[in-house]
Image (cartoon, helix red, strand yellow):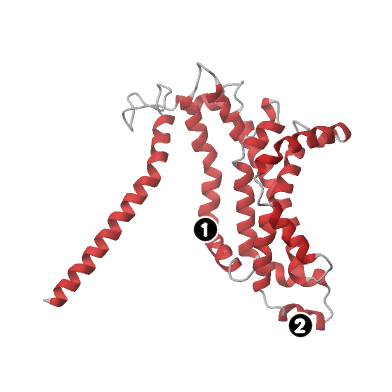
Amino acid sequence: MSSLTLKQRKNLGHLMRWLLAVVLILFAIFPVVWVISASINPSNTLASAKLIPDNFGWDNYRLLFNTPQFPFGRWLWNSVKISSITTVLSVSITTLAAYAFSRLRFTGRQTMLKAILLIQVFPGLLAMIAIFTLVTQFGTIIPALGLDTHAGLIMVYLGGAMGVNIWLMKGFFDTIPRAIDESAMVDGATHWQIFSLLLLPLMRPILVVIGILSFIGTYGDFILARILLKSTEQYPLMVGLFIFTSGEFSQKWGPFAAGALIGALPIMIIYLILQDQIVGGLTQGAVKG
């Protein structure tokens, strides 16, 4: 009798876990399903009583690519371009800085690390006015890095992405045994050879994590891009989609939902391809700081 009771308890436990998993999955996918429904809804509204609207169609998707005043393809390309360039530069600079903080010993090392961490405590919104003023004045000297330029926006992104990424990558560097460096030095290897030939291949998981975090952070940014970019042709996707909902009497929620779904595809594809690397990079980098 007791064994049967134990078996029933195990079955009940499995059932409860399955029910909880189903509830969480439904809770997570319901907003996505609702946006999909809005994207095929010809009534151009989010307040629909049916998940599958009457007379649904693909007019909202056609509107995105066939309306000259809404260059959706250009916005999507701008987002991918800005995010990709920022990611490559951010990962490169962060890797070099983290290697220096982890492996080299120099005056002010600990102070600089603490200063980097302290700066990250303050919200980025506090610096918006200063950033706008700085980019405006910098543009008078070098117009290519001023307002309404992708290069100027990328430079701002690079400045804000260094702090947390350096600490995260330094923690991963610290998990790699120093015996590798010492053995290579005995054989006459330079610091650059140790970094590029021995350590960098071992850093692939954390490089993927930093790259994805940088890409998503810039790809989904709205505030900085809205402040620093003025012309419609220069807008990234998030700022461009805002145009569909900014009109007082002409909100286009259908095209907005369709554009949001298409814009989410690059992030989803990256996650699906690199999900194993993301988990490995985050867990290994947190072992030692």
Instruction: Tell me the kind of residue under disc 1.
Output: Gln
Q: Residue at x 65, y 51 (%)?
A: 121
Could you tell me if residue 247 is visible in this image?
A: yes
Do the residues under discs 2 and 1 have CB atoms within 8 angstroms?
no
**In the picture provided, is 184 more to the left or to the right than 174?**
right
- Check disc 2 and report the residue beneath it: 183
Q: Residue at x 74, y 51 (%)?
A: 89
| Residue 60 % position (x, y) | 47, 26
Per the model, the C-alpha gap separating discs 2 and 1 is 33 Å
**In the picture provided, is 181 more to the left or to the right than 64?**
right
Instruction: Tell me the kind of residue under disc 2.
Output: Ser
| Residue 123 % position (x, y) | 65, 45
| Residue 167 % position (x, y) | 67, 61
Which element type, helix, strand or loop, lies under badge 2? Answer: helix
Q: Residue at x 33, y 33 (%)?
A: 51
Which element type, helix, strand or loop, lies under badge 1? Answer: helix
Disc 1 packing (10 Å; few <14; some 14–19; many ≥20): some
- Check disc 1 and report the residue beneath it: 275
Q: Quadrant of the C terminus?
A: bottom right
Q: Of label 2 and label 1, which has the lower sequence position? A: 2
Could you tell me if residue 81 is visible in this image?
A: no
